Amino acid sequence: MEEYRYKKVLLVDDSEIDNFINSKLITKTHFAKETIEKLSGSAALEYLKTECKKADSLPEVIFLDIMMPVMDGFGFLDEYDKLPDLIKDTCKIIMLSSSESFKDLNRANSSRLVNKFLNKPLSEKALEVIKF
Amino acid sequence: MRFLLPETPKASSRQRSTDLSDENFKRLIEAMHEGVLYSDNNDKILYVNNSFCELTGYSYDELVGRIYSDFLIAGKDRIMMESKVLLRKEGIGDQYELQILRKNGELVWTMVNGIPIQDDEEKVIGSMGTYSVITEVKKTEKRLKAINQELNTFIYKLSHDLRGPVASIKGLANLARTEILDPESLNYIELISKSVHRLDSILTDLLEIVRIKENAIYTESIAMETLVDSILHSISPQEDLKKMKFTIRVEAGLNFVSDKKILSAVIHNTIDNSIKYKDSTKDVNIFDLVICTYHTGIRIIVDDNGVGIPYNIHEKIFDMFYRGHIDSKGTGLGLYIVKNGVEKLGGSIHMESEPEIGTKFVIDIPTIFN
């Protein structure tokens, strides 16, 4: 039986198709055993708050899309920052963008909450080199 | 009162008195469509014509004797006006745009043509200006700028937003390729994949263009060897590059101050052009890249033995969306990006090409001094 690199990852993206692609790729490459999909920043925040109360149930990695309606990726980060330290110490955030926008890249890189910035679509290659 | 044009300070007084009397000058000025204002060296109004009164909304008596810079000019323009007065005192005339504050508080844009007035000893005793109303021109200019800006934003947003779904299709095709076994379906997937990659390149190029046109230049010291290295790695697909016999010669330790992203786009697209238009009938496809110091900046030479460019289209190859070859795989934007990038960096580009022999680009870019 092949080992999974992570137990659980959370996908935050308003596009169901992109969540489908990413979740497929993540399980196929054994990047993680379980993927949770949330279609908005607020739904993801709620999820994190709930899981925080259970033991050992938080996702280890969060894939966060930048372009989302109402609350975009950066808006999510502002709210995420207010969450308990337990969450922030457990989860690593990877920001995803399809724009290759330098502005986004700079903003993501300068945020202490973001561990990595990747372009969409996610690829096997990109997942391979992720190490925290 | 004598009017002397600054360009001809030595015009003989004899000519003036025979051809046009002072009286005729006055009548001409009074009839002029443009506003005319004559003032002494202390900005005191000595004379205005009828058109000037109409322009400002003041009567002749309300204007003459007053200091015009005190009430006809908006605060923000007063410093500029002081420099104009100094110019006049040195006997120099010039043209500039100025907002006039009307009696009713409105601001009106005018084009001013100011000249110094000299006495018989050629001493400057005041200045005279003609004022043409250009409110409409200004409005149009403002509107054009706004439309242009909006258009660029639109293209940027459009290319930006389209990339989301394009990335999704790319992702789906990648997944499908690994899961679908039926060869016929797989063939369709490959074709979809190819098309979506092409669409993606067009969007990337469009974004690049808007970025070059709109963004301010950001200068930094660039290690050219490192930059060229990263450009070669970003050529896609890498196999196309590997198939070429390329020589890279970058002057050792060359550092250059310019905008890295724009410079990178220029070099990338020039190399890409050589790769795209290689001559498949030749046994070896060559391109040489040379980067060296040149005057205050650098010279970039990209030389290939590709298909070459027919003489009749030499003029067109830098045009937007122009594709000069029958099996062009490009977007038609590559050399347009190169040209725009080079222009933005204040450089120049020169092309030599012979069909079936090859093409050579020589790009000179000056160092940007802050």
Image (cartoon, helix red, strand yellow):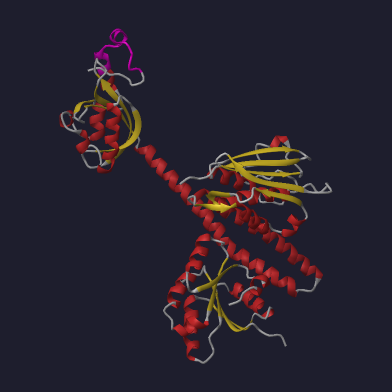
Q: Position of residue B333 (x, y in %)?
A: 63, 48
Q: Is residue A110 left or right of residue B104?
A: right
Q: Residue furthest front?
A: B253
Q: Is residue B151 visible?
A: no
- Of B205 and B247, nearer the camera is B247
The part of the chain drawn in magenta is B8-26
Q: Position of residue B20 (x, y in %)?
A: 30, 11
Q: Is residue B122 left or right of residue A19?
A: left
- Of A74 and A129, nearer the camera is A129
> Which part of the image, by quadrant, shows the N terminus of chain B?
top left
Q: Residue at x 55, y 61 (%)?
A: B161
Q: Position of residue B310 (x, y in %)?
A: 73, 37
Q: Is residue B185 left or right of residue B142?
A: right
| Residue A126 magenta-highlighted | no
Q: Is residue B243 left or right of residue B204?
A: right
Q: Residue at x 57, y 46 (%)?
A: B341
| Residue B12 magenta-highlighted | yes
- Of A85 and B2, nearer the camera is A85
Q: Residue at x 53, y 86 (%)?
A: A58
